[in-house]
Image (cartoon, rainbow, N blue to C red):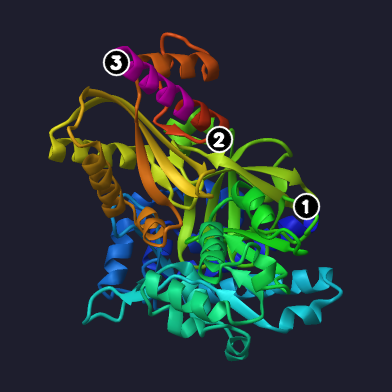
């Protein structure tokens, strides 16, 4: 890997250690005595959210200088095990880094597009999240990172927007979506910024309210979709169909509430350029799934020592005061010169196809709570999701083996949906916006489960049925086996 990568990353780390040394956390681990990466990895432990949550709770009560020396009043809400989610601190340094990241995205696109003036003509649509106060008396604010970026967008950009981002971040989702769509169908929209599931819903509703058959009839000059938060390749076939006849460009951002990490700087490639000089220091745990029960005990390597084709779990240190913070994604490097990456999965069992980030224990908690409320009993379950071909939109499927089946499965389904929304904020947001349609419960008979496992698992004594199924073919087969088993049961009863 080029020396420039090591140089850039070493400068980022040195700057963070210098600023972090003034904080309570930095003093605890003697940041001022750390001179290089090797010392940093040796003296500072890797952490999960649970281990830094006490610091974050103190920040939310007004204490300062705990993780980062500047005043922190803003927090990005990430997916979590409660409805409130995880609250990631946002320093002014971090927000400036996010602005620089987005400038890199736009400048990269302009360089690739000789007709870049087309980009600054017509109207732009964005669908940011919202920001709210922690409580009426507090100056602490919580919100999606997209909302903070919208709030910080330059004033001149509003001249091109269908609606002001500063207005939208104060609105509830349904109001925001409907008002923006009503104005957009009357405008010459050329660029859309949204997560893929919301963009898909935006296109579908535009066709419904206008009665048109093709998006090109509504927005003939639509050219660019910028998205992130969900895997673009999951939605790409549906976008290609809806946007047929348009010469579309797609830019995918890879980031999280913790920071922005990479983006598609080459429109001809599906992998992403990792940004190494923008307030984030990266470490990598090789082959994480082999050590998922002891990730914090594994040795990390810096970016300048990674290898192509090896799966890595990501550990980040950022200018928001996160130091050696573990991210659940599994990443492989496709190019070491740039460097370039692709996200290939998650370390733990988690379903995040549509940005919902539902972990297996969250699915189990929601299902157990529902069964207790409805007086039903189950033994085995699995869940997953696909874009339902009948409606062209994402939907979750739950495959449940019953001991005592509920009398009213529809009521059970509605309550399960509500309980999961209460547990997981991202799922709640996507359900509220209809980015994910209502779930479906299918009866997982022993016959259906055996057929599925025979086809998709190497059966051994210790082989367990996965609780999360994250593959289109595997989910499709499970749906098919369950429905076939059900129809055969009906025939026998007749």
Q: x, y (%) of residue 77?
A: 39, 63
In the picture of the structure, the residue carrying the numbered disc 1 is 269
- Asked where in the image residue 226 lies, by quadrant, the reply is bottom right
- Asked where in the image residue 490 lies, by quadrant, the reply is top left
Q: Could you tell me if residue 476 is visible in this image?
A: yes
In the picture of the structure, the residue carrying the numbered disc 2 is 472
Q: Quadrant of the C terminus?
A: top left
Which class describes the residues within 10 Å of circle 3: few (<14), some (14-19), or many (20+)?
A: few
Q: Which residues are magenta?
A: 479-494
Mark 1 or mark 3, which is nearer the start of the sequence? Answer: 1
Q: Nearer the viewer, residue 289 or 433?
A: 433
Say which of marks 3 and 1 sits in front.
Answer: 3
In the picture of the structure, the residue carrying the numbered disc 3 is 494
Mark 2 or mark 1, which is nearer the start of the sequence? Answer: 1
Q: Main secondary structure of the magenta part?
A: helix
Q: Which type of secondary structure does the marked residue at label 1 adopt?
A: loop
Q: Which type of secondary structure does the marked residue at label 2 adopt?
A: helix
């Amino acid at each position: 890997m080029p020396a420039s990568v090591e140089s850039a990353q070493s400068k980022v780390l040195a700057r963070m250690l210098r600023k972090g040394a003034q904080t309570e956390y930095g003093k605890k681990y003697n940041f001022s005595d750390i001179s290089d990466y090797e010392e940093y990895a040796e003296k500072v432990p890797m952490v999960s959210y649970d281990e830094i949550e006490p610091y974050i709770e103190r920040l939310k009560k007004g204490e300062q200088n705990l993780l980062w020396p500047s005043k922190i009043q803003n927090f990005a809400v990430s997916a979590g095990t409660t409805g409130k989610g995880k609250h990631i601190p946002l320093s002014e340094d971090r927000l400036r880094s996010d602005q620089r990241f987005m400038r890199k995205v736009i400048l990269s696109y302009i360089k690739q597009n000789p007709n870049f003036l087309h980009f600054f003509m017509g109207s732009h649509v964005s669908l940011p999240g919202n920001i709210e106060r922690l409580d009426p008396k507090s100056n602490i604010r919580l919100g999606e990172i997209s909302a903070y970026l919208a709030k910080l967008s330059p004033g001149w950009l509003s001249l091109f927007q269908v609606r002001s981002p500063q207005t939208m971040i104060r609105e509830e989702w349904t109001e925001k979506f409907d008002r923006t769509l009503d104005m957009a169908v009357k405008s010459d929209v050329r660029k859309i910024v949204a997560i893929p599931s919301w963009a898909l819903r935006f296109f579908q509703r535009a066709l419904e309210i206008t009665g048109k058959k093709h998006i090109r009839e509504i927005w003939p000059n639509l050219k660019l979709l910028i998205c992130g938060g969900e895997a673009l390749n999951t939605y790409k076939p549906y976008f290609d169909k809806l946007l047929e006849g348009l010469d579309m460009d797609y830019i995918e951002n890879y980031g999280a509430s913790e920071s922005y990490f990479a983006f598609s700087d080459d429109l001809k490639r599906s992998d992403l350029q990792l940004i190494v000089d923008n307030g984030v220091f990266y470490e990598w745990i090789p082959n994480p799934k082999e050590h998922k029960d002891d990730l914090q005990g594994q040795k990390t390597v810096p970016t300048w020592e990674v290898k192509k084709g090896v799966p890595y779990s990501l550990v980040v240190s950022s200018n928001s005061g996160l130091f050696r913070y573990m991210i659940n994604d599994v990443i492989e490097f496709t190019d070491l010169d740039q460097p370039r990456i692709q996200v290939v999965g998650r370390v733990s069992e988690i379903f995040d196809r549509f940005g919902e980030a539902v972990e297996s224990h969250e699915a189990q908690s929601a299902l157990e709570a529902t069964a207790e409320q409805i007086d039903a009993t189950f033994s085995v379950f699995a869940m997953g999701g696909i874009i339902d071909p009948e409606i062209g939109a994402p939907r979750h499927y739950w495959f449940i083996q019953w001991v005592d089946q509920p009398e009213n499965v529809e009521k059970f389904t509605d309550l399960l949906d509500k309980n999961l929304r209460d547990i997981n904020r991202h799922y709640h947001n996507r359900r509220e916006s209809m980015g994910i349609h209502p779930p479906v419960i299918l009866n997982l008979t022993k016959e259906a489960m055996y057929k599925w496992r025979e086809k998709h698992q190497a059966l051994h004594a210790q082989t367990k049925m996965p609780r999360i199924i994250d593959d289109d073919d595997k989910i499709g087969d499970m749906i098919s086996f369950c429905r076939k088993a059900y129809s055969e049961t009906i025939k026998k009863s007749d």
